[in-house]
Every structure is written in structure tokens, then in C-alpha cells.
Amino acid sequence: MPTSPAALLRRLEATRLEYGPGGAATKLALLQRLARTRLANARQVLRLHEHLCFLRAYPDGREVLAQVERMLAGFARRRDLRRHRDELADSGVAGCDIRYRFFWPTARWLAARWPEQLAIDWDEVDDPEKLAAALPLLVTPPEATWLRTRKPAPRAALDRLRGHITDGAFYVRRAEAMPGDDFTREAFFDGLEAPFVLRPAPGTPSRTHARYERPPVVFRSQAPPRGRPDLRTELARPPRSVRAVSATAGQRLIDLAQEAMVTRARDLDAFAYGDPRDVRVVDDGDGLRWALIGTTPERRPVLRATYGQLALRNGVPIAYAESDMLFGCADLSFNVFESFRGGEAAFVFARLLAMLRQLFGAQSFTFEPYQLGRENDEGLASGAWWFYYKLGFRPRNGAIRALAGTELARMRRNRAYRSSRKTLARLAEDYLYFEPGGHRAAFWPRLAELGARLAPSLAAAAGADREVAVQACMREAAKLLGVSSLRRIGAGARVAWERWAPIVASLPGLEGWSADERSALARIVFAKGGRRDSDYLALFDAHPKLGAALRRMTGA
């Protein structure tokens, strides 16, 4: 058994994928030693933390798990962590600050739950004058007059304005009280790009304590699968079960997903705007579960259905994804959290596809260029393009296919060869597609042109007054689809009709549809504003003419 702290840590890390007879006893002995050992620097403290998180997700015995739980529960009290706390800021480790320019929904979420811990990070404010110019919009007229006349420094001004609450909580809450809707408040808030710091306290977001407590623990007798799975085989193997949860449980899972983002300096709209009424838990067996999170009606895309996915191993968040679906095709983002890389990333990704096929009928899958590395340093550094290519995704772009062929030839000649960063950036300039069974995936960029096609008719109807034009479209769409009145519909349904009405009014060939086909389209629009976006998607896929009409309209 090694004796120095550094050697103990290295030996523990060497056991990462060692499972089987004797493995648990070795890990337990090393953990017990490290629980009493002071580490020399911040990097070593973080390495121990990451290994504990890994063992919590992939334990090989009750004693190991119990020791890991004890160490994580007391991690913020470790003397070496307190000593290196400043260096560990932004790590997501319990007891450490988190600094980030939080976007509107996340800042609002933090201010509502931890108002005493959220502050403006004045050391990172790029343009104090920009913030000073915004403050008069957040306060009463006499206060605004003082701000404009005396022009106090924004930090001093907020100290006078905020009273007993933090400047961060005051700033967020005043933005939340502004007139307008949530979209205008978001535009105002995000345009200022204010930096925040979330101070640690019991219960604040951390990777140390992140866990969904309900699933039973599955102990491992072998390492997580590291091989490259056959996607077609995995697609044919559905998950074990799908269970809708209560709104209360749904909110807990949304909070867990939000914490996973906050502690890793990330934002995901599907989590930030998650709807607790539309959360399901998908059991994939062997301790792997997914929290499937839908978005609130006002935040759903007009055409596609969007869901966020949080992967849980024994309740521990290990990865996340977001899927936009239409035409039987899922456009994906996928990321394994750093603590859990080097293991079963390909397997977890394959199970994501199987879940999307089972729940949403996805027959083909795509990745947009950003997810592959275009203007995305993390995607380039991880070699995301080759990861998905080796799993069976392929480019349609002829130039990229030719470049990939050249790179593959170089790899065959030299097994140590790796594509350069410049080459990876060129490969990531266009979409990748996975089309098993010959199902043609949608060409998503064309879908974005829908607005350009609708603009001339909306402008002709009412010029700059788009609200008048939309109301006219709603009346026309309701008449075309046989809906007697839209006056007393719910808020979600109204949002859906306002967004879909210009599309319905311009849909090619609608006049030749039967009454039943038009009635089915009305149900689709209502479902877009209903409880679950997946209900909309199922009705959309079942319509005999809508998908083809939209493809003709957009070229997707």
C-alpha cells in the first residue's frame, strides 16, 4: 500500500475500471486512507472529488458506496479543500464559489431559491456604464431621477437600492418585475451580460451532492462497457419502462438537471424552461435511467418537439442531451460530464437513440455543425466528429466526405495519426446523419427558412403591425379548420394558435383536404399548446398529409 498522499491518489485512480474479486476491498482501503489524508494542492483535491463521484455512480459494493457517501457528505469540511477553496472556484465542488454569466431563466431560478447567496461578481463586470444605464429602468421614478442626475457608480447605487438582500437577488427580482412578458425581460437581462457569483451554503448547487435518491442502487461486478456498440442493434432493444412522475417529482428532476448545468458553466433551454407536468423517468436497466424533460408551451419551438434528457447512473447525473424532433427525425446534442468520460459514453449515447425511437418514433438522427465542433472549442477538443462517424453517422456534403476519406487513408497508413484541429473544424462545417433502414433524415436548415416564406404575406396583411396580421391569420385558420371559436382557449393553446395560424393560412393544398384531415390539423395545433409536446408529435406523425405539405413548403 503506498504511503504518500499523491501515491495513494494515483493508486486509487488506477482502480477506476477494476471490478471483480478483491477490487472493492482495495478501493475501500485506499478510500479510508484518503479520508484521513491532507492533499497537497487544489488539483489533487479535485481529482479525489472526481473519483468519488465516479464511484458513487459505479459502486462495486455496499461498503465502498457507504465510504464514498461519507466522504462526499463531508467534502466541504476537508481542510485541504478549505485551504485551496479559491483555486477550486467554478469546479462545482461543494463549499466553493460558482462564477458565471447566468442567463435569464437560470438567474431567476437561483434568485428564487438562494437569494442570500447570489451576488454580482464586480471583478468581472466588463462595462459598468452599461449596467448603470439599465438601473433606472428597474426602480421608481424618483430613484431613476437620482440615478440619471447624480450618476453614482453602479455598485454603490445597488448598495443603496438593495436594502437587506444581495445586489444579485435585487437585480434579478427587479428585472422580473419589469413590464412586458418573459421574452422581453429575457432580452433585457441577457443583453447586459452581468456576471454573478453563487456563494456556497447548505443546499446550494454542487456536483458533490447531486443525486436522484429514488432508484435502488445497482452494484457492478464489471467495468462499464467501453466498446463501440452497434447502433442498429441497440435501436432494436427498447428501454425497460417509462413512468410519468408527479409535478412535484418532475420539479425535483428539473432542479437536478439545472444544478448539473449550473455547476458546469452550462445552460440548456430544455432544462431552464422545463415543465414539471411533462417529466418522465425511463428505466434502461443496470442502474441507468433517464429523466425526460419537456418544455413549457410558450417555450416550445413552432414545429419541432423538444425534450431534454438527463442520464442517471444510480441516480447520479452522468450525461445530458437535447433532442428536437419532427418528420421522424431527431436532431441531437449529447455530452458526457467530464467526471464520467473514458468509459461508457458510446453505450449511453446508443441507449439515448433507442429511447428516442421507442418514445417518439425517431427513425433517423442528425447532428448540427455546432455539436460537432463548429465555433465550439469543446467539440473540437473532444473529437466529437470522429466519435459519431465511427458509430455510423455520415456527412451528405461531398467535400466533407472526400476529406473524411483522405483522413481515413492516413489513419490506415499510420495508426498514431490524428486529425488536426484545423481539419476537425473543416469536417464540422456541415451536418452528420444516421439513417438506418433508409429513412431519409430532414434537412433542418431549410426549416429555418419558413419565416422568410411567411414574411411577405404577413407584411401585406398589416405592414409592421404583426399582431393584427396574426389575428387575421387566426380567424382564417380557425375557419379553414372548422374551429368555431378561439376566444376561450387556454394560454398554452393560444400561444400555439398564434404561432401556427400563419403557417395554416399558407399551407399548400389545404383547400383539397377532407374535413377529417382539417379537423386532425386543428387537434395538432391545440396539442402544441397542451400538456406534452410528445402528444403533438404523435398527432403530427399520424396525419396523412401535413408532413408532406410542410416539406414542400420548406424543403426540409
Image (cartoon, grey):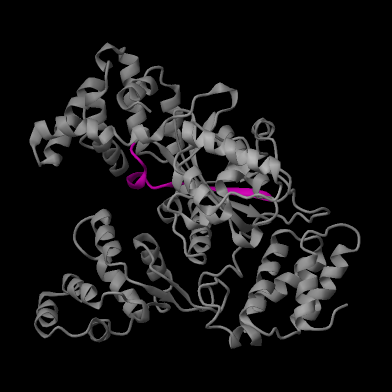
> Where in the figure is residue 545, as x and y percent of width and height?
37, 18
Residue 151 occupies which quadrant of the picture? bottom left
Asked whether residue 249 is in view, the answer is: no
Question: What is the number of callouts on the image?
Answer: 0
**Foreground residue among 380 and 545:** 380
Q: In the rendered view, would you say 5 is above or below 473?
A: below
Please report the residue visible at 62 percent of the width from the left and 80 percent of the height from the top: 42
> Where in the figure is residue 212, as x and y percent of width and height?
61, 59
Residue at the far right in the pictured view? 21
**Foreground residue among 547 and 108:** 547
Task: Indicate whether residue 222 is drawn in magenta.
Answer: no
**Foreground residue among 466 and 409:** 409
> Where in the figure is residue 281, as x and y percent of width and height?
58, 47
Q: In the rendered view, would you say 20 is above or below 72?
A: above
Residue 523 occupies which quadrant of the picture? top left
Q: In the rendered view, would you say 261 is above or below 448?
A: below
Task: Indicate whether residue 298 is drawn in magenta.
Answer: yes
Please report the residue visible at 75 percent of the width from the left and 68 percent of the height from the top: 13
Please report the residue visible at 75 percent of the width from the left and 84 percent of the height from the top: 37
| Quadrant of the image containing the N terminus | bottom right
**Foreground residue among 165 and 413:** 413
Asked whether residue 144 is in view, the answer is: yes
Q: In the rendered view, would you say 89 is above or below 419?
A: below
| Quadrant of the image containing the C terminus | top left
> Where in the figure is residue 416, as x and y percent of width and height?
70, 51
What range is drawn magenta here? 288-302
Please report the residue visible at 15 percent of the width from the left and 31 percent of the height from the top: 456
